[in-house]
Image: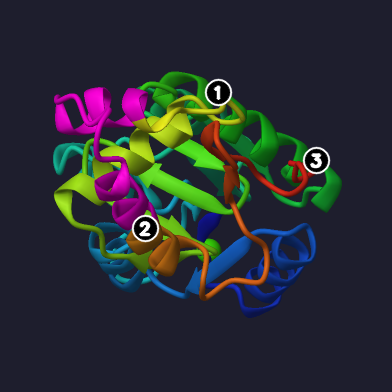
Amino acid sequence: MKILIIEDELKTGNYLKQGLTEAGFNADLARNGPDGLHLALTAEEPYRLIILDVMLPGIDGWEVLSTLRLAGNQVPVIFLTANSQVDDRVKGLELGADDYLIKPFAFSELLARVRTSLRHANNANEATFLRVGDLELDLLRRRVFRQGKRIELTEKEFSLLVLFMQRQGEVLSSSLIASQVWDMNFDSDTNVIAVAIRRLRSKVDDPYSSKLIHTLRGMGYFLEAPERASE
Ligand code: CA
């Protein structure tokens, strides 16, 4: 899960990046406002959270956040500031920050806030964002990622994967898949389904050691993560 840290203080930035990486996140670090904004707006795989320092060279944290929101980017943001003034807090929340942390802070406190923000965002995005293990599918942008790497799928492969992910763990028969994905009856010719699933596997499973798509001989297919991730 990708997190962007925008922080100009060398020590704090490195400390945050290292801590979040050790906690299992994929953290990028930008050291000024313009670089951070550029990363946030152009990342191929969208960031799931931004940790944003207020006092930054170039463009300050307020402006980074308001520019993101103007561009329609609704990524959750946690503000970091050395300033404990109430005015700042109100300003941050008005601009659409989700949370606020005053420096100096304990890393455990930040990590707790990060997890809370991600949980809230996940609930809000449930309908458009599917995840099974390390496989992520963005329904709105029609993009698929595994271990953070983009996977290119055809339209049919994408629809097939959506069906598998929405009904994870459920055994889906060839005829059910045919009716849902091809809008047709393939009772007589399940080879079409077998071929499509083989192609999907070659992209989603073959390059990875753990397999998600499984065959239950004579019954159908199902998609399941080998084991649940702790987060
Ligand atoms: Ca700063």
Specify which label sits upstream in the sequence, 1 or 3: 3
- Dot 3, how many residues are within 10 Å of its Cα: few (below 14), some (14-19), or many (20+)? few
Locate residue 101 relative to residue 127 in the image: left or right: right
- How far apart marks 2 and 1 lie (CA) works out to 31 Å
**Up-down relation of residue 166 to residue 131 (above or below):** above
**Dot 3: element:** helix
Specify which label sits upstream in the sequence, 2 or 1: 1
- Which residue is at a point 66% across and 71% down the rendered structure image? 209
Of circles 1 and 3, the one toward us is: 1
Q: Which residue is mark 1?
A: 120
Q: Which residues are magenta?
A: 175-197
Q: Which residue is mark 2?
A: 200
Specify which label sits upstream in the sequence, 3 or 2: 3
Q: Amino acid at mark 1?
A: His
- Dot 1, how many residues are within 10 Å of its Cα: few (below 14), some (14-19), or many (20+)? few
**Up-down relation of residue 157 to residue 75 (above or below):** below
Q: Is residue 182 magenta?
A: yes
Numbered label attached to residue 151: none
- Give the position of the N terminus as an image quadrant: bottom right
Q: Which residue is mark 3?
A: 109
